[in-house]
Image (cartoon, helix red, strand yellow):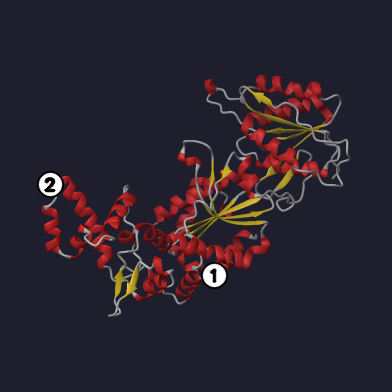
């Protein structure tokens, strides 16, 4: 297929990735391309219209910094980006045509190609109709099929092959394209350097537990890891736990005394003047008492035993009974519990990805935290695992939760976030602690309620955590 148009017009919406893909493809395949026109919406509060100018600028910056292939351009040829065209009302035929007249006046008998994936339906329709009328037989157009990553031309004889692997973009550029920055995860790591040295040993312990079908014992109410005890769900949980651990590390800790003896509890209560303060004190005592009196089972202790010494929340005493370590301090306790609560699953999945799929992707990243400079907390989020293949992003979210509602919330988030930085072309994997009945319902509901193509989302339950099963499930989904 011979491409010979000199001008490319891009309609810029809130997802600039298709425009990037098309631009890269046309730059590499069309030696005649001289100009790229960026057409976007202007902010118009009267009609509740946001500007997509920032995406146009991001796209221009990214395309401008990249070098063209060495066999494409001679020394005098360079892509020009004329002034960005802003449409005051993207639903108005008159306003769209008025602004597109700038392209017509500049044409000088050149050939124009319109790529209309990014625009609204009205913007695409009016732009296509107007530009086709003005350029006549020197006009062509196309869009990107999200289903199979093919550029579909208005001349149906011209359809590209799948270009998902041909056009590449790294994660940093992908998030910048969508207005995000990459947070320095080294400074905000959830796992300390000391703890990180033991990761392989701990994950191997979990791998054996899963293989030997002892996972239910690890999460058992009879001595297994219990989130309600070790990480109580409370709005002020961190503050309360900090106060508890600040107290119990002291020799004369009133909380420690009260948790070990009803008589001491009564004595400490008598020292407190107000009922409100008594309630607060009792809340701390009750939280800590459950931790102190807990009797971890053997499987739970096997995992804790693989932790660094300073992070072992329980140790066996001389009578071979687990004892809670009151001197551990809240910071180390929190890191240990966060790992038990679910970080281990992220690490476990990450190791399987690196072990079996390292050569299948251009980038494999973990715990990525894109953010926008905004006061809105919804603009800050985390992706457990990120896979980049060509220009396609696959996001993986991990949760040990069994409850459908909690899993569904995680599912909504991974779908929303991957779309937010990778467009509708992205795929998402949700790995949960749910059983198979819930998994099937969950996938069906996520597809229906988010409008996701069912081939772009998969849900894996705890029955699929075993290494060989997880490898096959991931392989079946991401490599098809």
Q: Residue furthest front?
A: 251
Secondary element under disc 2, as helix, strand or loop, is loop
Please state which of residues 6 and 365 is positioned toward the viewer in this rendering. 365
Q: Compared with residue 142, is residue 216 higher up or lower down, i.e. above or below? A: below
Question: What quarter of the picture does the N terminus occupy?
Answer: top right
Q: Compared with residue 30, is residue 328 higher up or lower down, i.e. above or below? A: below
- Tell me the residue at 65%/51% (across/down): 392
- Tell me the residue at 29%/51% (across/down): 240
Do the numbered discs 1 and 2 sit on residues whose CB atoms are within 8 Å?
Answer: no
Q: Mark 1 — residue?
A: 469
Q: Quadrant of residue 74?
A: top right
Q: Is residue 354 left or right of residue 260?
A: right
Marks 1, 2: nearer the viewer: 2
Residue 177, x across and y down, in percent: 64, 40
Residue 106 visible in rendering: yes
Q: Is residue 420 left or right of residue 434?
A: right
Please state which of residues 444 and 412 is positioned toward the viewer in this rendering. 412
Residue 65, x across and y down, in percent: 73, 40
Q: Residue furthest bottom?
A: 319
How far apart are labels 1 and 2 at the CA level?
Answer: 59 Å
Dot 1 alpha-carbon crowd within 10 angstroms: few under 14, some 14 to 19, many 20 or more: few
Secondary element under disc 1, as helix, strand or loop, is helix
Q: Quadrant of residue 52?
A: top right
Question: What quarter of the picture does the C terminus occupy?
Answer: bottom right
Q: Earlier in the sequence, mark 1 or mark 2?
A: 2
Residue 89, x across and y down, in percent: 61, 23
Residue 12 visible in rendering: no
Please state which of residues 1 and 396 is positioned toward the viewer in this rendering. 396
Q: Mark 2 — residue?
A: 273
Q: Compared with residue 82, is residue 469 higher up or lower down, i.e. above or below? A: below
């Amino acid at each position: 297929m011979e491409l010979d148009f000199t001008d490319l017009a891009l309609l810029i919406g809130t997802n600039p990735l298709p425009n990037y893909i098309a631009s890269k493809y046309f730059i590499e395949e069309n030696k005649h391309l001289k100009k790229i026109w960026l057409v976007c919406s202007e902010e118009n509060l009267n009609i509740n219209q946001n500007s997509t100018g920032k995406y146009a600028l991001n796209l221009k910056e990214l395309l401008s910094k990249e070098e063209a292939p060495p066999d494409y351009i001679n020394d005098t040829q360079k892509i020009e980006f004329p002034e960005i065209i802003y449409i005051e009302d993207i639903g108005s035929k008159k306003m769209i045509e008025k602004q597109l007249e700038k392209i017509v006046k500049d044409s000088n008998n050149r050939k124009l190609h319109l790529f209309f994936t990014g625009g609204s339906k009205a913007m695409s329709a009016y732009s296509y109709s107007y530009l086709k009328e003005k350029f006549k037989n020197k006009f062509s157009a196309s869009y990107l099929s999200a289903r199979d990553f093919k550029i579909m031309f208005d001349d149906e004889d011209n359809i590209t092959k799948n270009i998902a692997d041909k056009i590449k973009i790294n994660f940093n550029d992908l998030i910048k394209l969508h207005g995000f920055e990459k947070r320095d995860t080294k400074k905000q790591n959830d796992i300390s350097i000391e703890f990180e040295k033991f990761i392989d040993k701990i994950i191997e312990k979990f791998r054996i537990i899963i293989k030997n079908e002892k996972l239910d014992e690890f999460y058992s109410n009879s001595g297994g890891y219990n989130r309600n005890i070790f990480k109580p769900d409370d709005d002020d949980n961190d503050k309360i736990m900090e106060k508890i651990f600040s107290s119990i590390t002291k020799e004369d800790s009133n909380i420690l005394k009260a948790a070990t003896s009803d008589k001491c509890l009564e004595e400490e209560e008598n020292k407190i003047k107000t009922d409100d303060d008594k309630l607060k004190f009792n809340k701390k005592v009750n939280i800590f008492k459950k931790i102190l009196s807990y009797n971890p089972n053997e499987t739970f202790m096997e995992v804790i035993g693989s932790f660094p010494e300073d992070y072992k929340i329980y140790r066996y005493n001389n009578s071979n009974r687990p004892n809670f370590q009151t001197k551990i301090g809240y910071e180390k306790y929190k890191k240990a519990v966060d790992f038990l609560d679910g970080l281990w699953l992220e690490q476990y999945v990450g190791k399987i990805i690196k072990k079996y799929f390292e050569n299948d992707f251009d980038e494999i990243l973990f715990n990525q935290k894109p953010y926008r400079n905004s006061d809105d907390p919804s603009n800050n989020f985390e992706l457990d695992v990120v896979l980049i293949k060509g220009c396609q992003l696959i996001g993986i979210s991990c949760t040990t939760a069994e409850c459908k509602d909690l899993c569904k919330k995680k599912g909504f988030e991974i779908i929303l976030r991957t779309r937010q930085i990778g467009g509708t072309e992205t795929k998402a994997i949700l790995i949960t602690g749910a059983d198979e009945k819930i998994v099937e319902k969950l996938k069906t509901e996520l597809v229906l309620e988010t409008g996701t193509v069912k081939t772009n989302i998969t849900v894996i339950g705890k029955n699929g955590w075993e290494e060989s099963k997880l490898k096959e499930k991931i392989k079946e989904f991401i490599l098809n």
